[in-house]
Image: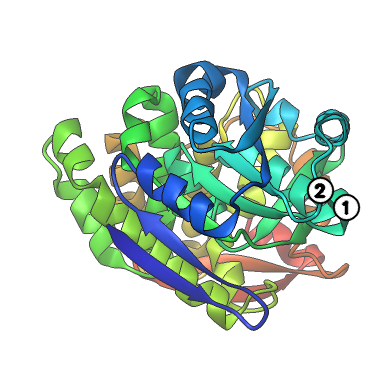
Amino acid sequence: MKTIEVNLREANYNIYIERNITNKIIKYLQENYNNKKIAIITDSNLEKLYVENFKKTIEENSFNTKIISVKPGEESKSIDTLKKVYFELCDFKLGRTDLIITFGGGVIGDLGGFAASTYLRGVDYIQVPTSLLAQVDSSIGGKVAVDLPWGKNLVGSFYHPKAVFIDPHFLRTLEKRFFNDGLSEVIKYGCIKDNSIIDELINYKNEKELLDNIDSLIFKCCNIKKIVVEKDEKDFGERMLLNFGHTLGHALEKYFNYKHYSHGEAVAIGMVHITKKSEKLNITEKNVSKHLEEVLKKYDLPYEIPEINMEEIYNSIFLDKKSSGKNISLIMIKKIGVGIIKEVSFEELENYI
């Protein structure tokens, strides 16, 4: 088992990476939450695939558990779904010393983590991420949120889990599109911090070789995020680098009502688009965007921007978390492996997006 320690001023926790990790989770629960109630927040697909059996295993070890299941997909990351989760937690009479487990992808981690941060002013939770995107990115760092009609992640908080348990075994049941969706975030880490990640992805001969080595890639990405978050927990400086491709990506997701592009697909387009722009401005070395297109194409990820109304896109970007009213922090790369943050006024945004 690989372990990464996250050490912050007010929160310390471990990320555990191991295949078939259920026994480790049970041991952790016995050591830290014996005789406590446990609410498992998941989606209806995972409930049938994994969570029903996971619940039985927990109950065999004397825990009182309840499954709170929501509809899969970004639409569940809403205030309406959050209210339903609160109702279920109240109905279960979950107390402040009890525990929430988020068992799912990025939507479940964000929704469940935000519920944990606000219900009774804060209840402990642990993350069991099941998608590649959640395993390498969203389950780590304490960002939890829900969407509003005006944009993504507009209501949220920083609330760290007590532990993160990553089992690459869950990835075997992911549809190829959603596995590749997570690879977009892996590629992001390679672009901003570690060019060896891109080299590895380019050189894998087939899907089996990639899956055989996915544990190592997950570890690399998690370790990058741990280092960045420890330096800048609240996202005012270096942590912004993790948003490479996300400014346009989030706007594209909203533009198509979260139905046309997955998160990773939108981010992939965002990474290439801003890199092409920054190449023209001599911020980025020439042909970097072509190298980025090469790895995205290999894993069936889109990289060409569709026909869109750019005025609507700019309106979405104005509400972006990295906006300070008149300016926005845009993330670019000088070359593969070297990310930078650039303050740009909204008047000159068209030159970059």
326 versus 294 height, above or below: below
> Could you tell me the amino acid type at mark 1?
Leu
- Residue 260: x, y in percent? 61, 23
Q: Residue 120, labelled with which disc?
A: 1
Q: Quadrant of the N terminus?
A: bottom left
The residue pinned by badge 2 equals 95
Q: Residue at x 81, y 48 (%)?
A: 95
- Residue 219: x, y in percent? 33, 59
Question: Of tags 1 and 2, which is closer to the observer?
Answer: 2
Figure quadrant of residue 143? bottom right
Question: Is disc 2 placed on a helix, strand or loop?
Answer: loop
Figure quadrant of residue 17? bottom left
Crowding around mark 1 (Cα neighbors within 10 Å: few <14, some 14 to 19, many 20+) is few
Compared across the picture, whether 212 is left or right of 246 comes to left
Compared across the picture, whether 316 is left or right of 124 comes to right
Q: Quadrant of the C terminus?
A: bottom right
241 versus 238 height, above or below: above
> Could you tell me the amino acid type at mark 2?
Gly
Separation of disc 1 and disc 2 at Cα?
8 Å
- Residue 316: x, y in percent? 80, 46
Q: Residue 331, labelled with which disc?
A: none
Depth check: give the residue in front, 63 or 77.
Answer: 63
Q: Residue at x 55, y 52 (%)?
A: 139
Depth check: give the residue in front, 194 or 169.
Answer: 169
Figure quadrant of residue 192? bottom left
Depth check: give the residue in front, 232 or 337.
Answer: 232
- Residue 65: x, y in percent? 65, 33
**Mark before the other along the chain sequence, 1 or 2:** 2
Determine if residue 273 is in view: yes
